[in-house]
Amino acid sequence: MVDTTNFNKMDSTLTKVDERFRRTMTSVTDLLFPVSKTKDQQKQQIIRKSHEYVTNLPLQMALYFNCFFFPLWLIGSLVILELKWEYLDDLYRIVLAAVYIVYFIIEIVRLYLGYLGNLMERVPELAGSWLLTLLLSTPLILLLNINDSAILLPMERALHLIMGIFVLFEVVIGYFAIRAMVNYQVTKYHLQQFSDLENMDDSGDYFPESRYTS
């Protein structure tokens, strides 16, 4: 007979981690993207269109093309790194190897969170992707672009420049995408509360959902 105790503990742990992540991202989102005062016109628009999509198309297009360009960038950068490896100092060998490894991991996580958050309209995931882009991806790609001591070749500089454009564009567009999504979902949440209170049954039970879940 299969012992399901370990599976239940693992599932409970993963659930707690996911809830903690969503609460943390919600708090960070409230701090970085304060909700503006809701206008009557916006309220009426949400009432008329209860399932309006607020997915940001430019951000989604940037993430889409970034997913295709990232493998090319990684392969090209590693090939160039191999060609100039013997000409680099020991310090820059370690630094560049560490940068590429860290960037590879970060890029996979942030693109996944960005895709999931933007398409599913989930603010915590989208905010997590934006923070990774701003705090980690941007400094790393700038380091690769401006560090002339790493013997930058023309092809390598072109690859890093294109990747830098993707990252900077996603930082700017991602900020406005999160801000619009937060304003919409908070307004929708408050209107849904009023609707639920009006339709509440005689038992008086009322369990509102999180603001940033749809």
Image (cartoon, rainbow, N blue to C red):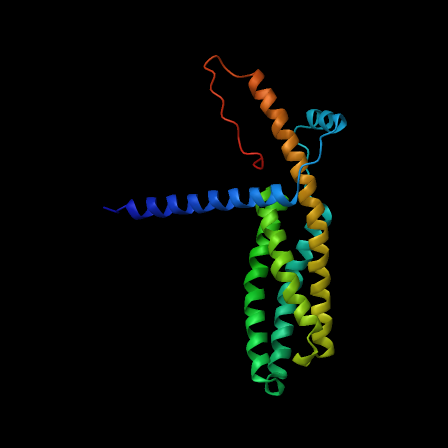
The number of numbered discs placed on residues in the rendered structure image is 0
Q: Is 205 displayed left or right of 42 in the figure?
A: left
Percent of width and height locating residue 45: 73, 27
Residue 120, visible in the rendered structure: no
Percent of width and height locating residue 12: 38, 43
Quadrant occupied by the C terminus: top right
Which residue shows up at 76% across the image and 27% down it? 41
Viewer-proximal residue among 192 and 155: 192
Please tell me whether residue 136 is drawn above or below residue 20 in the rendered image.
below
Percent of width and height locating residue 207: 49, 26
Which residue shows up at 65% across the image and 73% down it? 76
Q: Which residue lies furthest to the bottom in this view?
A: 86
In the figure, residue 77 lies in which quadrant?
Answer: bottom right
Please tell me whether residue 50 is drawn above or below residue 14 in the rendered image.
above
In the figure, residue 99 lies in which quadrant?
Answer: bottom right
Q: Residue furthest right?
A: 41
Viewer-proximal residue among 34 and 124: 34
Q: Residue furthest left?
A: 1
Q: Residue furthest front?
A: 31
Which residue shows up at 66% across the image and 28% down it? 50
Residue 129, visible in the rendered structure: yes
Please tell me whether residue 161 is drawn above or below residue 55 in the rendered image.
below
Percent of width and height locating residue 208: 52, 27
Please tell me whether residue 145 is drawn above or below residue 131 in the rendered image.
below
